[in-house]
Image: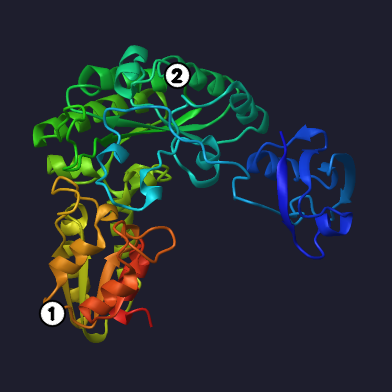
């Protein structure tokens, strides 16, 4: 395997050694280069021997670096230096299968790429890993690996993921654990399928892989209104969500008793909101290892906000701000806004709940609110001096929503200065009282 060098940065180590655009990078220090993980791992040395193929001729370039962590200046066609690996499963709960037609192409891509797990924290199912990739994780000691487990029952995993290899691939978890690779795991729970006793079984089995299994997140299945012809699933009821929390609390109590008070499993914030139960305090979530799964996001936001509020002197503000958010965060943001209004004279905060008409009202998270829903439900409303929307509603570049409505378009349509605010309590407070000044 080799990768084509697209460009070489001027005066870089690679440039000074003689590497040229168009060269095929074959190996570094005799280690084959397949993609970005190989490249990034093997350039971490002071002495490098780069083997390249140039027009059929094998060449070797020797590089000596003053800093072993320094880059060598080679550029490639894509960041991964390879095509992104797609998912081989047909999960009964797959969110991509519930997307409406006519959206941008990237939204229909099903990612299941181990490299994205290491580089960006994405979750993988393990079903697409070849032997070389598993061994590479072990050899490079890539850690942590984020794994979508869903169930530790092999047969049930096959049924849920519609992949005959889904159960067998669970053995990779043991192999990683035997080699000291840390793992964060998630269970997407579907009512009556992998909760109840199946959830108890999965929790107990994953706990046997400690200390390498660092955390377990339980997340309720997300369902849109576009499920025609798909496996019959439904959302969690209040009592069912409460039962999931009870099972996890019961498990954690037992686990903590034998592990110095540690907590291993967490229900996502959505389960608490569905069950109408108070969320745990920030201390409960430890290092917040499952934030991207919506585990502890509300607690962290509240903790940061209240601490920032206590450290900020009372003063007169005299401004009106509107916060637009999804149903899931609505009550919390109302609570935080009221706290700010009590502390700062003249501050008025209007919190508006945006109902997800695009995907369906069962979708309550802010990250899936479209620009059209923001426009339709904010149009004509008095928005004050500034509008704050969740940063997660926008794609990574921060310029457009899922439906391709741009942030600038929303701002112009509503005629108000708008700000996209990340899940950061300190920044939220600053935006409320200073407006980003």
The Cα atoms of the two marked residues, 2 and 1, are separated by: 54 Å
The residue tagged 1 is 382
Q: Which mark is on residue 424?
A: none
First in sequence: mark 2 vs mark 1 = 2
Q: Residue 184 versus residue 388: which sits nearer the camera?
A: 388
**Residue 256 left/right relative to 181:** left
Within-10-Å neighbours for mark 1: few <14, some 14–19, many 20+: few
- Is residue 389 visible to the viewer in this orientation of the structure? yes
Q: Against 401, is 136 above or below? A: above
Q: Secondary structure at mark 1?
A: loop
Q: Are marks 2 and 1 in contact (CB under 8 Å)?
A: no
Dividing the picture into quarters, in which one does residue 200 lie?
top left
Dividing the picture into quarters, in which one does residue 39 lie?
top right
Q: Which mark is on residue 170?
A: 2
Q: Secondary structure at mark 2?
A: helix
Residue occupying the point 43% across, 28% down:
88
Within-10-Å neighbours for mark 2: few <14, some 14–19, many 20+: some
Q: Against 305, is 327 above or below? A: above
**Residue 39 left/right relative to 59:** left
Q: Position of residue 160 (x, y in %)?
A: 30, 22
Residue occupying the point 45% across, 33% down:
124
Q: Position of residue 432 (x, y in %)?
A: 27, 75
Q: Against 259, is 29 above or below? A: below
Residue occupying the point 67% across, 28% down:
139
Q: Residue 208 versus residue 58: which sits nearer the camera?
A: 58
Display coloring: rainbow
**In which quadrant will I find the N terminus?**
top right
């Amino acid at each position: 395997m080799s990768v084509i060098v697209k460009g070489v940065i001027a005066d870089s180590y690679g440039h000074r050694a003689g590497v040229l655009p168009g060269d095929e990078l074959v190996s570094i220090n005799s280690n084959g280069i397949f993609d970005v993980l190989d490249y990034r791992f093997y350039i971490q040395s002071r002495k490098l021997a780069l083997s390249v193929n140039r027009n059929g001729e094998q060449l070797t370039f020797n590089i000596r670096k003053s800093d072993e962590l320094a880059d060598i200046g080679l550029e490639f066609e894509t960041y991964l230096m390879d095509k992104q690996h797609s998912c081989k499963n047909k999960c009964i709960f797959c969110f991509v299968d519930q997307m409406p037609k006519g959206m941008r192409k990237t939204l229909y891509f099903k990612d299941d790429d181990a490299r994205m797990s290491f580089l960006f924290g994405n979750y993988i199912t393990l079903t697409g890993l070849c032997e070389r990739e598993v061994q590479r994780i072990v050899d490079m000691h890539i850690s942590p690996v984020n794994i979508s487990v869903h169930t530790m029952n092999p047969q049930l995993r096959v049924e849920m993921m519609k992949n005959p290899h889904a159960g067998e691939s669970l053995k990779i978890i043991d192999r990683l654990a035997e080699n000291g690779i840390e793992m964060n795991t998630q269970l997407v729970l579907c009512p009556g399928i992998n909760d109840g006793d199946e959830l108890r079984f999965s929790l107990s089995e994953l706990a046997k892989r400690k200390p390498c299994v660092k955390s377990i997140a339980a997340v309720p299945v997300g369902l849109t209104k576009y499920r025609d012809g798909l496996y019959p699933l439904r959302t969690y009821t209040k009592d069912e969500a409460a039962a999931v929390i009870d099972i996890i609390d019961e498990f954690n109590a037992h686990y903590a008793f034998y592990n110095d008070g540690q907590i291993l499993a967490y229900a996502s914030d959505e389960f608490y909101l569905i069950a109408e139960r108070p969320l745990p305090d920030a201390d409960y979530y430890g290092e917040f290892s499952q934030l991207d799964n919506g585990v502890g996001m509300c607690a962290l936001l509240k903790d940061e906000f209240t601490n920032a509020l206590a450290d900020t002197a009372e003063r007169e503000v005299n401004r009106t701000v509107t916060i637009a958010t999804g149903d899931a965060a609505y009550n919390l943001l109302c609570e935080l806004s009221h706290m700010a209004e009590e502390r700062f004279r003249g501050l008025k905060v209007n919190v508006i709940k945006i109902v997800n008409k695009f995907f369906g009202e069962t979708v309550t998270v802010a990250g899936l609110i479209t620009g059209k829903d923001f426009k339709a439900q904010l149009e004509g409303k008095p928005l004050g001096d500034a509008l704050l929307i969740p940063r997660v509603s926008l794609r990574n570049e921060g310029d457009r929503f899922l439906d391709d409505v741009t942030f600038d378009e929303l701002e112009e349509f509503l005629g108000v200065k708008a700000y996209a605010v990340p899940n950061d309590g300190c920044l939220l407070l600053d935006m409320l009282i200073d407006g980003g000044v």
